[in-house]
Image: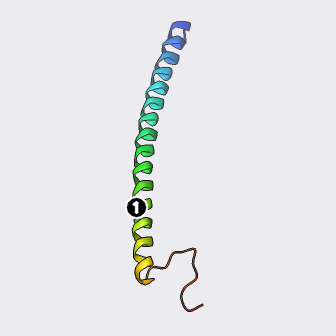
């Protein structure tokens, strides 16, 4: 294998590596947006559950023991 062939092979591998890194960056960015949305939704649901539990006490959170304890 000549030096030129080695250089071409390395350039191809580098281009592939750069493309993979860019693709992964896009995936991470998308996941971060989804996580943020899910955190907001969970917070809203917790607030709703707290509001409902303040009225009749029917909502049990995982950090509270069940009513029969």
Crowd band around label 1 with a 10 angstrom C-alpha radius: few (<14), some (14–19), many (20+) = few
Q: Is residue 45 above or below residue 40?
A: below
Residue 49 drawn at (x, y percent): 42, 72
Q: Residue at 46% x, 34% y: name it.
A: 25
Task: Quarter of the image for the N terminus: give it.
Answer: top right
Could you tell me which residue is drawn at 41 percent across and 84 percent down?
56
- In the figure, 62 relative to 5: above or below? below
- What residue appears at the point 49 percent right and 16 percent down from the top-left corner? 11
- In the image shown, does 15 or 44 lie closer to the viewer? 44
Query: Toward the viewer: 38 or 9?
Result: 38
x, y percentage for residue 29? 43, 38
What is the tally of numbered marks visible in this picture? 1
Label 1: element kind: helix
Q: Which residue is mark 1?
A: 44
State the residue lying farthest toward the bottom.
68
Q: Quadrant of residue 6?
A: top right
Q: Horizontally, is 29 left or right of 64 in the view? A: left
Placement of 24 over or under 48, stated as above or below: above
Instruction: Residue lying at the far front in this picture: please name it.
Output: 55
Please identify the quadrant where the C terminus is shown: bottom right
């Amino acid at each position: 294998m000549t030096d030129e062939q080695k250089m071409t092979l390395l350039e191809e591998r580098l281009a592939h590596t750069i493309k993979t890194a860019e693709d992964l960056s896009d995936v991470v960015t998308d996941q971060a947006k989804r996580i943020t949305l899910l955190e907001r939704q969970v917070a809203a649901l917790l607030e709703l559950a707290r509001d409902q539990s303040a009225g009749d006490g029917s909502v049990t959170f995982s950090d509270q023991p069940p009513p029969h304890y």
